Amino acid sequence: MDEISKSAMIEHYSTLLDRHGPTMAALEYRSEEQQIKRYSVLAGIGPMGVLSSVLDVGCGLGHLCDFLRRYGWNGAYTGIDINPTMVASARERLPKDEFMCVDMSCESLDRQFDYVFCGATVQHRPRSGDPIKYMEEMVTRMFAMTKIGLAFDVFSNRVEFTDDQKLYVDPSYLVNFCLSLTRRYVLRNDYRPYEIVVYLYKNVAKNDLNIFTEWIGSEPRIIK
């Protein structure tokens, strides 16, 4: 991300943190339900091992870690964010977990994680440069850092309104971009009408029925 956009975003969220303290309001969530719904759909990437490792890109205050722990996950959590004030506050909240100030658009960590999550982060449009290239570089870097899968969300351009500060993506373009990274992916548009949640998987091995070996099906749900 360009320095002007980065500085503006840091100032924006630092102001919210000063005003609201280490709460969901500092991250612009209007309610706990809204925050939980996002975490739930991101974690829907698949069954997570209880000791699996997680990288949370744009971690804010580390609330995703709290969410996963409530469901019994007890793995290693690493949160990264471009905002040093937010990172410091997250460290105070969760001193046993790892938080670092890292800009994923131009930096990488020298290790991999079972899962990488990125919620409400690549939705921000940089003020200069090609916004689509920015998103592609972010996603490509994040996908390289996962052993199992990456979950992230973007705004669809099939909307009735736009915000100059947000990045909107054509769903058909998104399919082709996903295919450039992996043959195994999921695009979900069942969560919010203008938001697409994407799952990208590393393992593309198939069995003799030409089915991905790690695909997990489910019984049909019939409701009366």
Image: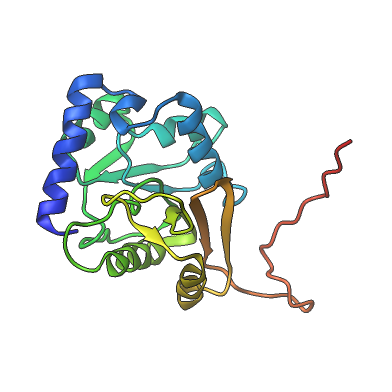
Looking at the rendered structure, the number of numbered marks drawn on it comes to 0
Residue 2 rendering spot, x and y as whole percentages: 14, 59
- Which residue ends up furthest to the front in the rendered image? 160
Residue 154 rendering spot, x and y as whole percentages: 42, 54
Residue 73 rendering spot, x and y as whole percentages: 53, 36
- Which residue ends up furthest to the right in the rendered image? 224
Q: Give the residue at x 29% y 70%.
A: 133
Horizontal side, residue 34 vs residue 49: left or right? left
Nearer to me, 92 or 164: 164
Q: Give the residue at x 32% y 67%.
A: 132
- Which residue ends up furthest to the top in the rendered image? 20
In the picture, residue 207 is in which quadrant?
bottom right
Q: Give the residue at x 36% y 51%.
A: 162
Horizontal side, residue 166 vs residue 195: left or right? left
Q: Quadrant of the image for the C terminus?
A: top right
Colour logic = rainbow
Nearer to me, 146 or 217: 217
Horizontal side, residue 83 vs residue 120: left or right? left
Residue 105 rendering spot, x and y as whole percentages: 24, 60
Q: Is residue 210 above or below residue 45?
A: below
Q: Quadrant of the image for the N terminus?
A: bottom left
Nearer to me, 93 or 177: 177
Q: Give the residue at x 48% y 32%.
A: 34
Q: Is residue 97 above or below residue 58?
A: above
